[in-house]
Image: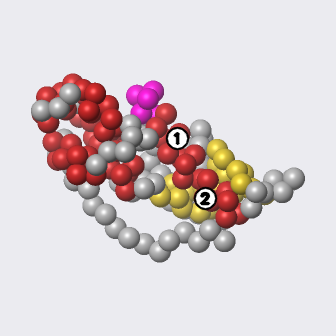
Amino acid sequence: MQYAYPCVLTPEANGGFSVSFPDVPEALTSGSDHAEALAMAEDALVAALGAYIECREDIPFPSPVIAGQKRIAVRSIVAAKLALYSAMRAQRITKIELARRMGLSEGAIRKLLNLDHRSHIGQVERALRMVGRSLVIADEPALQLT
């Protein structure tokens, strides 16, 4: 799955723009101009998706981008952690079970699933392999912030 979500920029009456994500309603932010609002969007998205993990909820699937929306992709390490979490949920694999498979502590697995923790991508890829998944990286044109 690609962890890139459509967002809506709405002009504010007092200037600036608010940002919302139809698929992740908890992800809200704003900026004094179009560029700042888009720059803040990924942080808001990652914070909201992290809350889904903390609450042990499914990660929402991104819907297609429609006219007037922008697409916000999370960083590759965050996408890898979201994929790991989603695979573990789908297969009902606990943190303790994944820790056993990897020869690590449960605390180490908690860090691998923490979107704010600076994990090494190699560790997350190894964990993905343990749950029968792999990470595929693709590039595309960058979002223009202006």
Q: Secondary structure at mark 1?
A: helix
| Relative depth, front residue between 56 and 22 | 56
Residue 110 lies, in percent from the top left, at 32, 31
What is the number of the mark on residue 103? Answer: none
Magenta span includes 54: yes
**Rendered-image quadrant of the N terminus:** bottom left
Whether residue 90 is visible: no
For marks 2 and 1, the one nearer the N-term is 2
What is the number of the mark on residue 39? Answer: 2
Residue at 32%, 45% in the rendered image = 119
For the record, the magenta segment spans 52-56
Magenta span includes 43: no
Q: Secondary structure at mark 2?
A: helix
Identify which amino acid the numbered label 1 is placed on: Ala
**Rendered-image quadrant of the C terminus:** bottom right
Identify which amino acid the numbered label 2 is placed on: Ala
Residue 37 lies, in percent from the top left, at 67, 57
Residue at 87%, 53% in the rendered image = 14
What is the number of the mark on residue 47? Answer: 1
Circle 1 packing at 10 Å, graded few (<14), some (14-19), many (20+), is some
Residue at 28%, 49% in the rendered image = 120
Residue 121 lies, in percent from the top left, at 28, 52
Left or right, 21 with respect to 76, comes to right
